[in-house]
Structures are given as structure tokens and as C-alpha cells.
Image: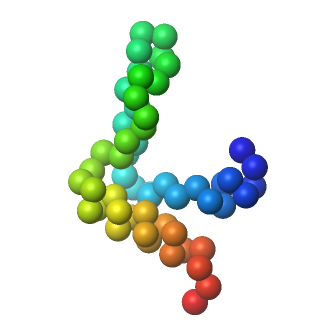
Amino acid sequence: MSDQAIMELNLPTGIPIVYELNQELKPTKPMRFLGDEETVRKAMEAVAAQGKAK
């Protein structure tokens, strides 16, 4: 993963990520966050705001 891709990554801290895997441990669905949409949205906004100038 490039430095730029890391800078653009927006993963909310403190919210578990759920992966559904098959018997070969390959993902069967895209990852999702374990939490209600509003909580996840607010956490993602907080992470995005960390990189902005004050």
C-alpha cells in the first residue's frame, strides 16, 4: 500500500470490523463495521478531521 493510499484510508478507531470468510479463509462479502450507521459515520468523520489544518 502506498503512502498516499494510507493517507486516504479512513478507518474509524474503536469500531470492530467484521469479515465473513469461507472454509479457505477467503472473504465471501466485503468487510463491514460492527455498529450502527450513525456511530460509524461520526467516527469516520472524526478520523477524516484529524488530518485537516486547524
Q: Name the foreground residue: 12 vs 38.
A: 38
Residue in the image at 28% along x and 61% along y: 39
Determine whether 53 is above or below 5 in the image. below
Q: Position of residue 34 (x, y in %)?
A: 30, 45
Which residue is at the far top? 23
Residue 43, by quadrant, is: bottom left
Which residue is at the far left? 36
Q: Position of residue 18 (x, y in %)?
A: 37, 37
| Side (left or right) of 32 relative to 37 | right
**Number of marks drawn:** 0
Q: Quadrant of the N terminus?
A: top right
Which residue is at the far front? 29
Residue in the image at 44% along x and 57% along y: 13
Look at the image and name its color scheme.
rainbow
Residue in the image at 37% along x and 52% along y: 15
Q: Quadrant of the C terminus?
A: bottom right
Q: Position of residue 30 (x, y in %)?
A: 43, 34
Determine whether 18 is above or below 16 in the image. above
Determine whether 51 is above or below 24 in the image. below
Which residue is at the far bottom? 54
